[in-house]
Amino acid sequence: MKTETLLPLGKLDPGLAVPDSPLDLASVPREAGLVDRLGYHGLLMEETKDDPFAVLALAATASSRVQLGTSVAIAFARSPYVTAMSAWTLQKLSGGRFELGLGSQVRGHVRRRFGMEWHPPGPWMRDYVRAVRAIWTAWQHETRLEFDSAHYKLDLSVPLFTPAPIEHPDIPILVAAVNPYMAGVAAAVADGVRLHPVCSPRYIAEVIRPAVAARRPTGQRFELCLKPLIATAGDADTLARRTEIARQRLAFYVSTPAYRLPFERAGLGDLAAELAQLSKQQRWNEMAKRIDDAVLHEWVVVAPYADLAATLVARYGQLVDRVEVSIPQSTPGDHAVLAGILDELARAPAAPAA
C-alpha cells in the first residue's frame, strides 16, 4: 500500500485539522527532504491558506524521489489553461514527479469566495480535465489547440505564450470525489480518485468501487486514494485526547450537507440533519457529544503507533491503493517510528482493481 502525507508533516494531529497558524514556508524544504528519506510515496499540499503550486515548487527543489501533488487544487477557481501551465512547470521542476489533484469545491465558495460562475460540478469537471489534457497534448506535440465542449472552447495558440515540450509530459490527474457520480467522472477521464475522510470502508466497497468499475476504460491504470481520519499516539493518554479531536472533526463532517450521502447510506440521515442545525446555531461543543463510539469507529482509525499500520491494512488493504498518514515529527525517535509504519504499509499487498 502506498503512503502519502500532507505538508506540514510535523505539525498536525495525525489525520486531523489543518493548523490555525500559517505554514512556515522556510520549513518546506526541510520537511520535503525528511519525507524523501522516510520512504513516503507522495507529498501533498492542499489549497487552504497557501498556493499549493508555489509550496510544491519549494518541495521539488529539496527532494529527489517522492511524488509531489496537489490535494487538492480548486479546479473551478482557475481556467484550465492556468492550471495546465502550473502543472507543466512543476512537472519540469520536479523531473517528472508531479501529479495534479483537482477538487470542485461547493457552490458558495465558487461563487462568493472565488467570484466565479457555477455549473453542475460533474459534467463541468469532466470537461475541465479533458481541456487540461488537450492543452498539454498541444504543447507537447506542438500542434494547434482545438478543444470544444459544453464548458470550454479553446482554439487560440500563440507561440509567445506556448510552453515547449517537456521530458515527462504524462502528468497524472486525480479528482476528488465523495459521491458516486463524481467518482465515475474520475474513472472516465482521470488517473485516480481522491476520497474524502467521510468515505467509510463500507461506503467505499458498496458505492465508490462499483461506480469506478462501471466507468473505467478497460485496461486503464487507476488508483483509489484516501485521506482517512486517524487518531494515533504512542501512549494511551495522548491517544484518548486525539480520539476526542477526531470525534469533533467527524461531527463537523456529519453536519456538512455536501458530505451527507455517505452518512445517509449508513442510516445516519437524521443525525446529519440534527448536527447541521447545531452547526448553524454555532453550538459546536454539543455536536461531538452526538457522535457515539459505534459511529466514531466506523469512520475513524483509532490505534496506537505500534498497531497503526496493521489496522490500516485490515480496514483498507482490499479497498484503496494509497492512504494518507503521518504522526507528529519532533525527534529522531519520531522519525524512526514513522519510518517503521511506512515500511510496514509498503509491504502490504496491493488492492485488487475496482
Image (cartoon, helix red, strand yellow):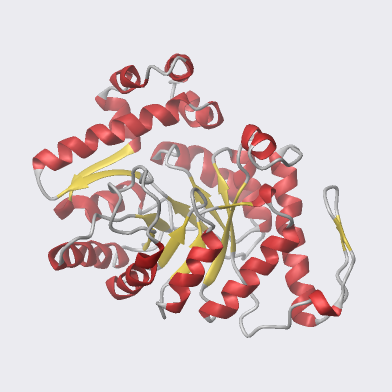
Quarter of the image holding residue 164? bottom right
The number of discs equals 0
| Most foreground residue, 277 or 298 | 277
| Most foreground residue, 184 or 93 | 93
Decide if residue 215 is in sight here.
no
What residue appears at the point 48 percent right and 31 percent down from the top-left corner? 262
| Most foreground residue, 240 or 307 | 240
Name the side, left or right, on which 108 lies relative to 134: left
What residue appears at the point 51 percent right and 75 percent down from the top-left corner? 97
Name the side, left or right, on which 153 lies relative to 223: right
The x and y percentages for residue 205 are 46, 42
Relative to 177, is 352 above or below?
Answer: below
The x and y percentages for residue 117 are 76, 39
Relative to 302, is 158 above or below?
Answer: below
| Most foreground residue, 305 or 242 | 242
Decide if residue 72 is in sight here.
yes
Q: Residue furthest bottom?
A: 167
The x and y percentages for residue 248 are 32, 30
Check the picture and name the quadrant holding the N terminus: bottom left
What residue appears at the point 25 percent right and 68 percent down from the top-left corner? 343
What residue appears at the point 24 percent right and 64 percent down from the top-left corner? 344
The x and y percentages for residue 6 are 39, 57
Name the side, left or right, on which 297 lies relative to 115: left
